[in-house]
Image (cartoon, grey):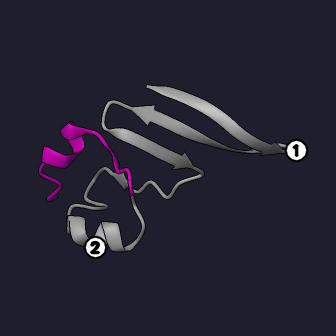
Amino acid sequence: MRFSVIASDGGSRAGIIETERGLVLTPQFMPVGTLGTVKAVSPEELRRMGAEVVLCNTYHLCRDTRP
């Protein structure tokens, strides 16, 4: 994985994250898939919201969150 800055303005920057699966332009909406925050949202809904990346931890996604 590699990150390259393509533009900056003061403390802000835009860039490209290069991964084995493709490119992600930043800044980017990246929902966090921990403790059920995206478990109830389908991949199609996430795409419609503009998500290209979901940050997740498999431990949290597989964990039973019932009290």
Residue 23 appears at what percent x and percent y? 44, 42
Which residue is drawn at the image coordinates 35% and 51% (left, top)? Answer: 54
Please state which amino acid type lies under the numbered disc 2: Glu
Q: Which residue is mark 1?
A: 10
SS for dot 2:
helix
Horizontal relation, residue 65 to residue 25: left or right: left
Q: CB under 8 Å between callouts 2 and 1? A: no
Which residue is drawn at the image coordinates 44% and 54% (left, top)? Answer: 30
- Give 6 or 30, whichever is nearer the viewer: 6
Horizontal relation, residue 42 to residue 3: left or right: left
- Give 26 or 31, whichever is nearer the viewer: 26
Which residue is drawn at the image coordinates 13% and 45% (left, top)? Answer: 62
Q: Measured along the vertical axis of the image, is residue 64 above or below residue 37? A: above
SS for dot 1:
loop
Residue 17 appears at what percent x and percent y? 50, 37
* Quarter of the view holding residue 8: top right
Q: Measured along the vertical axis of the image, is residue 8 above or below residue 67? A: above
* Residue 59 lies in the magenta stretch: yes
Q: Is residue 41 visible?
A: no
Q: Is residue 42 visible?
A: yes
Please state which amino acid type lies under the numbered disc 1: Gly
The mark nearer the N terminus, 2 or 1, is: 1
Q: Which residue is mark 2?
A: 45
Which residue is drawn at the image coordinates 28% and 53% (left, top)? Answer: 35
Count of labels in the image: 2
Q: Residue furthest top?
A: 1
- 10 Å neighbourhood of mark 1: few (<14), some, or many (≥20)? few
Q: Which residues are magenta?
A: 52-67
Q: Quadrant of the N terminus?
A: top left
Residue 26 appears at what percent x and percent y? 58, 48
* Residue 53 lies in the magenta stretch: yes
